[in-house]
Amino acid sequence: MLHAAVAVTAVPISGVLNRVMIDDLQILSSIVALLVVLPHLLAPIQVWIGNYSDQHPRWGYRRTPYIAAGLLLCISGAVLTPYAALAMGANFWPGLAFALLAFLLWGARV
């Protein structure tokens, strides 16, 4: 279910939002590509988080609290990425900082 939830958020972001950022907001495609790839660069961290969750259970559960936290981060990032795209269109540098945060939140899924 975790991967299905992540895939549901991946389609609007990588399939639609990148086109809006490039075509409508006139943001450089290389910057958009870096933002879309950024969550995939965080994938190796999932191994460390999985190992940590096995060794440090929370409330008697090993992975469930960490998965719930990852889903919360994924949803938060998915909600914030369109606002970050609009912020980049309005004022580029502060919007880019906001976009980095939003895409990192989206990519920090467990």
Image (spheres, rainbow, N blue to C red):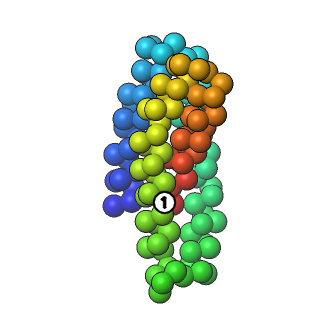
In the foreground, 95 or 48:
95
Q: Residue at x 53, y 19 (%)?
A: 90
The correct choice, above or below, for 102 with respect to 89 in the image is below
Q: Is residue 40 visible?
A: no
Pinpoint residue 49: horizontal percent, then vertical percent: 60, 66
**Relative to 96, 11 lies left or right:** left
Residue 67 appears in view:
yes
Image x and y of residue 32, in percent: 55, 26
Residue 27 spot, x, y in % from top left: 55, 17
Q: Residues within 10 Å of mark 1 (few under 14, many from 20)?
A: many
Residue 83 vs residue 21, the one in the foreground: 83
Q: Nearer the viewer, residue 33 or 97?
A: 97
Against 40, residue 89 (above or below) is above
The residue drawn where x is 48% and y is 45% is 77
User: Would you say 31 lies left or right of 77 here?
Assistant: right
Q: How many marks?
A: 1
Q: Which amino acid, by three-letter code, is at mark 1?
A: Gly
Residue depicted at 56% across the width and 74% down the height? 53
Where residue 88 sits, quadrant-wise, is top right
Residue corresponding to mark 1: 70
Q: Up-down: is 105 above or below 2?
A: above
Which image quadrant: the N terminus?
bottom left
Up-down: is 44 above or below 49?
above
| Element marked by disc 1 | helix
Image position, residue 106 (x, y; %):
50, 46
Q: Which residue is pictured at 42% across the width and 28% down the height?
A: 17
